[in-house]
Amino acid sequence: MALFKYRHPLIVSGSTGFNVDGGDNIDGLSRDELTFTIGQDVATTSDVVFNQVTPNSIIIGSIDSTHIVLADKSVSASNGALTQTAGEYLNISGDLTVPNVTLTGNLVVDKIEVSLTGSNTLYESGSTEFGDDSNDVHYITGSMLMSGSYALNNSTAMVEISNDTTEDGGSQTALATENVAYNAFGNQTPGFLYSRKKYAHKGSFVSSTTSSFTAVTASAPSDFVDTSKHDFMFFNQGMLMEHDAIDIEQSSSKFLMKINASSLGYGLDSTDEVVVWGKFNSPGYLDFDGLTNEVTTDFSGSSATPLNKTYSWWMKSTQTNKNYSVFGHGSNKRGTFTPNFSSGRALMWNGNNWYTYWQDTSAQDDGEWHHWMVYNDVETIVDSKLYVDGIKIGVSSFTTSGTVSNLNTYLQPLTIGAYKNNSTNTSHHFEGSIREFAVFSGDKTSNAAKYYNKGAPYNVTNESDLQGYWKMYEGSGTTVEDLSGEGNHGTIDGASWYNM
């Protein structure tokens, strides 16, 4: 057999993933066997492992049936995350389990089910199911718009929120809004107000078995149990008195407490202080006609030297012109406060060329109740202050063109509803309603918001520096009691009583 020898030996070598055994220096003179291997079994049933595959595209399965198409750069995986590039697509049939998925484009699905601390299901119809048991908790930040009905706690008892204020409502499956409740109950008088009417009154000694109060019991509206002694609590020297030994009687404007001394174990003494707390008619107010109505008091007598004082009161008025005068001490230039005096401005007079104007405020003529507080600095009028509903009103102007000698002394005690005690002079009187009138020594305007009390009159009986306090809550009679303890009671001349 002829033999030939390669001029240069033949060398067969492998590469990464491809191995050749016996392929070195083949010269043709001898028989050599070469074995080629790829390092692992690649049969259809084998478990093939590659460190990295970087093709332009991979197609698994038939393009016309269940398949995965991985086009170049359309899908990448790193650090346990699967990222879909915008503009490409990922088609998956069957189950896919991955730790994280990030989509930079749109996600279009027929249904999504998520289950963690809560679970949501989005259906192809657009309906959403929030969880499947009471342990699923969902937190929603912002607003939520819901159309259709809803059920609470799997019940059909409440299926909507209703704003129906018509009288033909009455749905048994609707929750009412605040507007519905207000229209139904907000103006119920006296029925709903009756259930919360409670006021305190101090009695006067009549006899060892009777104490008298200037008050009228609240009348029970229809469908309510009539007012009885059990709607009241009586205290003698701060000690609660037993109901079994007490009877009550309404005698005109007097409310009488009558006791059975033998049952109670003691009688009343003229020095006893008896206070009753219970259901009386609401506190009243006085209405002044602007012609002759006023209340005269014994506060600050004739020729008294003016001192710095704070006046606090509630009033309402619809008079948009000069409104003489909320209060005064004997002349329109002697400690007198007048709303709308000029250009809609309130004025505090203390003497010729000695006064303060404040800026216009609608509170003086809008027909609503407002709390007023004036600090009258009689010698340094630039320091006088006006507060309405707890808000300070700016000063418009002041005049001190004279000297402090222009300051007028008071000719008369305080008159409420006029600037002097003269019931026949119609140009001297206030038109409107007044209640809760109080006088303090010094500047108390730091309490303006406190006394306004968010629109509910504040009882100043125990406040410091109180010199006079006429609540005007009696509701009848011609006397307004001074609750400051100074005894400067007021006498009503023409003003009319009204209940709130």
Image (tube, rainbow, N blue to C red):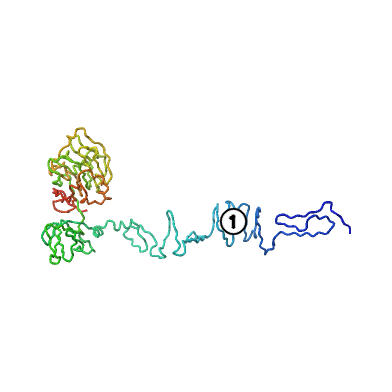
Q: Could you say which quadrant of the image residue 30 lies in?
A: bottom right
Total marks shown come to: 1
Q: Is residue 80 left or right of residue 299?
A: right
Say what amino acid the circle numbered 1 marks.
Answer: Leu
Q: Is residue 263 depicted above or below 56 in this figure?
A: below
Q: Is residue 94 depicted above or below 422 in this figure?
A: below
- Residue 262: x %, y % from top left: 12, 66
Q: Nearer the viewer, residue 471 or 220?
A: 471
Q: Is residue 276 left or right of residue 145?
A: left
- Residue 489: x %, y % from top left: 14, 49
Q: Give the crowd class for mark 1: few <14, some 14-19, many >=20 residues within 10 Å.
A: few
Element assignment for label 1: loop
Q: Is residue 157 depicted above or below 353 in this figure?
A: below
- Quarter of the image where the N terminus is located: bottom right
Q: Residue at x 21, y 55 (%)?
A: 282
Which residue of the protein is positioned furthest toward the right in this rendering? 1
Q: Is residue 372 left or right of residue 48?
A: left
Query: Can you identify the residue that label 1 sits on?
Result: 90
Q: Could you say which quadrant of the image residue 267 lies in?
A: bottom left
- Residue 124: x %, y % from top left: 51, 60
- Residue 166: x %, y % from top left: 32, 58
